[in-house]
């Protein structure tokens, strides 16, 4: 039987041990411990537990509730349980309001009873997740951004899409597979000590722990595995290693975004084979169209045709229209992004992708809508606009306030 992964949180070291001793070893595996400090959230994100046990001795401070609220915006597929020696009806109600699934005592219970109850709560939670659309475990999608032509906007679109996905609360890894001239780190103004080369050369091998060790967090919540800083290291990364890295990432991310180079080499082909969808990024000049036709034919021969989606970038009204692409390939254009040189240059120079530096600009809003289209097509759930989100939050807060008032009256 597979063990249930648990992380135990408490500022009290003795209490962590006390709670650990309540979990039957043959049923639960402790993936880690932490206090409620600044590092806790990152730690939990990296440990992928099914259950987070928040242990508190005495009154539960508000800081624990706000911690859980913040945690649950990032970590979706995990259940939080409060373990305390001071349980009251008010506490249970308050905990529920913050997304805590159960409040359990750590005193006066046997490990058998505690473990059994925790397993029951988890089983119910997993059933609830399967039933509701929101909590449904979405299978990982590997999305590649490619074109056989340089400078069409692959990196710009890959980076901005990855950020938008992360800001929608998705677990996202951005992998820079332009191994000779990767621009992802510069686009995000990140100075990573490590790159994919360190990962493939590490003695520990390609494991999820090492992927976490050699990748970095971006402030948007996105995780990034950078390309080497110098082109001569590119040859150390073999296609088989790229395939393995992507396969190992799959269970841990909802989206793996690949920014690819313009070269049709082994790494690119393997990466294309690993993708669920390949977004072919082109412009509407004649050289771009010629290259699009050539790349399309090669990917067709490699049996990748069904995954292709065409994006026209830097579009300005001219002789060649997006519809001409459709005539040529018999494919609908998935999305058209207008030319917006001012925003593009400013965002590159600032190291801040357009969706962050200027979300209302033509480029920023167009890239955000592209992500919304991708999410909606994958999940069948419409992405709410900012005003819609605010309205929903207001409604939820009002309902909560009314509930609290009713409870106070009842008392
Ligand atoms: N819609 C747009 N409007 C104006 N400029 C854009 C647009 N999209 C991207 N650019 C600019 O075009 C240039 C090339 O973009 P980018 O680096 O994303 O292309 P690429 O396909 O990844 O290039 P390479 O093949 O070199 O990796 C950058 O200066 C970028 O800011
Ligand atoms: Mg690029």
Image (tube, rainbow, N blue to C red):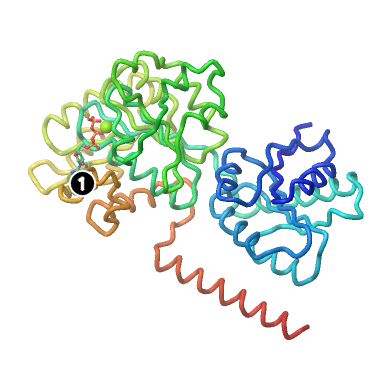
- Which residue occupies 64% across, 62% down? 65
Q: Which of 107 and 132 is in front in this view?
A: 107
Most extreme residue toward the bottom, as rendered? Answer: 409
Q: Is residue 213 left or right of residue 272?
A: right
Q: Quadrant of the C terminus?
A: bottom right
| Spot occupied by residue 272 in the image (x, y as percentages of width and height) | 38, 26
Q: Is residue 94 above or below residue 199?
A: below
Q: Nearer the viewer, residue 391 or 61?
A: 61
| Spot occupied by residue 174 in the image (x, y as percentages of width and height) | 41, 36
- Which residue occupies 82% across, 46% down? 18
Q: Name the residue under label 1.
A: 344
Q: In which quarter of the image is residue 84?
A: bottom right
Dot 1 surroundings within 10 Å: few (below 14), some, or many (20 or more)?
many
Q: Is residue 127 above or below residue 401?
A: above
Q: Is residue 74 above or below residue 255?
A: below
- Which residue occupies 78% across, 38% down? 28
Q: Quadrant of residue 233?
A: top left
Q: Which quadrant of the frame does ligand 2 lie within?
A: top left
Q: In this view, does 66 lie above or below 409?
A: above
Q: In this view, does 35 lie to the left or right of 157?
A: right
* Residue at disc 1, CB closer than 8 Å to ligand 1: yes
């Amino acid at each position: 039987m597979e063990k249930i992964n648990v992380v135990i949180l408490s500022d009290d070291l003795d209490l962590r041990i006390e709670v650990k001793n309540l979990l039957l070893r043959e049923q639960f595996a402790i993936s880690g411990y932490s206090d409620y400090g600044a590092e806790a959230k990152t730690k939990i994100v990296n440990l992928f537990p099914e259950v987070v046990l928040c242990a508190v001795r005495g009154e539960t401070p508000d800081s624990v509730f706000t911690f859980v609220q913040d945690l649950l915006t990032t970590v979706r597929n995990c259940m939080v349980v409060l373990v305390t020696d001071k349980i009251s009806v008010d506490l249970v109600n308050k905990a529920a309001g913050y997304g805590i699934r159960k409040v359990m005592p750590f005193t006066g219970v046997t490990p058998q009873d505690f473990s059994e109850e925790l397993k029951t709560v988890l089983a119910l939670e997993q059933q609830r997740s399967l039933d509701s659309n929101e909590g449904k475990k979405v299978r990982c999608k590997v999305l590649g951004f490619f074109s056989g032509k340089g400078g069409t906007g692959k990196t710009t679109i890959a980076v901005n899409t990855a950020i938008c996905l992360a800001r929608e609360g998705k677990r996202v890894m951005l992998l820079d597979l332009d191994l000779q001239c990767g621009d992802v780190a510069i686009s995000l103004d990140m100075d990573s000590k490590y790159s994919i080369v360190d990962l493939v050369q590490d003695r520990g091998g390609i494991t999820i722990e090492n992927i976490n060790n050699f990748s970095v967090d971006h402030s948007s919540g996105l995780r990034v595995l950078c390309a080497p800083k110098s082109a001569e290291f590119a040859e150390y990364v073999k296609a088989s290693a790229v395939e393995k890295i992507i396969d190992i990432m799959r269970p841990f991310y909802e989206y793996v975004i690949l920014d690819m180079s313009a070269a049709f080499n082994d790494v690119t082909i393997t990466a294309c084979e690993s993708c669920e969808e390949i977004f072919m990024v082109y412009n509407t000049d004649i050289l771009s169209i010629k290259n699009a036709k050539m790349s399309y034919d090669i990917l067709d021969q490699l049996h990748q045709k069904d995954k292709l989606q065409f994006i026209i970038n830097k579009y300005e009204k001219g002789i060649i229209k997006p519809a001409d692409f459709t005539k040529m390939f018999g494919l609908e254009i998935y999305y058209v992004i207008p030319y917006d040189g001012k925003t593009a240059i400013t965002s590159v120079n600032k190291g801040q992708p357009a969706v962050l530096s200027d979300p209302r600009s033509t480029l920023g809003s167009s890239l955000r809508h592209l992500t919304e289209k991708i999410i909606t097509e994958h999940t069948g759930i419409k992405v709410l606009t900012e005003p819609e989100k605010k309205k929903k939050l207001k409604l939820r807060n009002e309902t909560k306030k009314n509930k609290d008032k009713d409870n106070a009256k009842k008392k």
